[in-house]
Image (cartoon, rainbow, N blue to C red):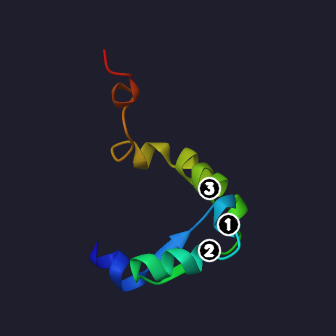
Amino acid sequence: MADIMAKGIYLAGGGSLLRGLDLLIQEEVKIPVKIIEDPMTAMVRGAGIVLENLDRLSETLAGTEELEPPK
């Protein structure tokens, strides 16, 4: 929470391009909000980085058992 308060919220993805969304969130939560550079491809680029580094990131990724629906 301290990092978010100090650095702000960064918006990514197509929804971040909705006109005025960043300003609305900023007014409501009183935390700086920024739209990242090239938000439309950020999620895909991030997923690509994870896939290229699966061996190093495997311990931090959620396991498939956590994705199973409750019985």
Q: Which mark is residue 57?
A: none
Residue at left offset 64%, top offset 66%? 16
> Which is nearer the N-term, disc 2 or disc 3?
2
Question: Pointer 1: residues within 10 angstroms few (<14), some, or many (20+)?
Answer: some
Q: Is residue 6 above or below residue 52?
A: below
Which quadrant of the rendered structure holds the C terminus? Answer: top left
Return the residue at label 1.
Answer: 39
Which quadrant of the rendered structure holds the N terminus? Answer: bottom left
Quarter-of-image position of residue 35:
bottom right
Residue 57 position, x and y percent, is 41, 48
Q: Which mark is residue 43?
A: 3
Residue at left offset 56%, top offset 69%? 11
Looking at the rendered structure, the secondary structure element under dot 2 is loop
| Residue nearest the observer in this picture, 45 or 67 | 67
Spatial distance from mark 1 to mark 3, Cα to Cα? 8 Å
Question: Do the CB atoms of the residues marked 1 and 2 lie less than 8 Å apart?
Answer: yes
Return the residue at label 2.
Answer: 36
Residue at left offset 34%, top offset 81%? 5
Name the kind of residue labelled 2 in the image: Ile
Residue 51 position, x and y percent, is 56, 44
Quarter-of-image position of residue 65:
top left
Q: Is residue 70 above or below residue 21?
A: above
Q: Is residue 48 above or below residue 68?
A: below
Spatial distance from mark 1 to mark 2, Cα to Cα? 6 Å
Name the residue at the top extreme.
71
- Residue 70 relative to residue 33: left or right: left
Looking at the rendered structure, the secondary structure element under dot 1 is helix
Name the kind of residue labelled 1 in the image: Pro
- Residue 17 relative to residue 3: left or right: right
Name the kind of residue labelled 3 in the image: Met
Name the residue at the left extreme.
2
